[in-house]
Amino acid sequence: MSDQTDDALKRVRETFATAAEEAEQLSESAKQDVEDAIDDLEARIEDLRNSS
C-alpha cells in the first residue's frame, strides 16, 4: 500500500478509537446521572414517608 493509504488508515483507526473512548465516557456519565436521579428520588420518597 502507498504511504498515503497507510496514513489514511492510521487516521481512521485513531479517529475510531477516540470516538469509542468518548462514547464510553458518555455512557458512564449517563449511567451515573441515572443512578444519582434514582438516589434523589428514593430520598424524596423517604422524606415524604417520614413527614406523613
Image: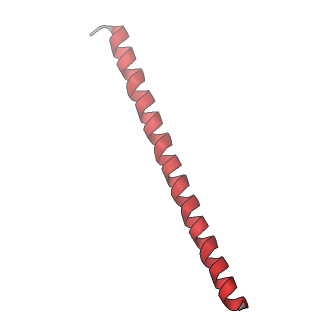
Residue 38 lies, with reference to residue 9, above or below; the image says: below
Q: Looking at the picture, how far across and down is residue 21, in whole percent?
A: 46, 41
Is residue 43 shown left or right of residue 9?
Answer: right
Residue 30 lies, with reference to residue 13, above or below; the image says: below
Is residue 25 shown left or right of residue 9?
Answer: right
**Residue lying farthest right?**
51
Q: Which residue is at 48% across, 43% downward?
A: 23
Is residue 38 shown left or right of residue 16?
Answer: right
Q: Looking at the picture, how far across and down is residue 3, in whole percent?
A: 34, 9
Q: Considering the image in quadrants, where does the N terminus appear?
A: top left
- The quarter holding residue 30 reads bottom right
Q: Which residue is at 39% across, 15% downward?
A: 7
Q: Looking at the picture, how far across and down is residue 2, in whole percent?
A: 30, 7
Say how many tags the image has.
0
Q: Which residue is at 46% across, 47% downward?
A: 24
Q: Nearer the viewer, residue 27 or 46?
A: 46
**Residue lying farthest left?**
1
Residue 46 lies, with reference to residue 28, above or below; the image says: below
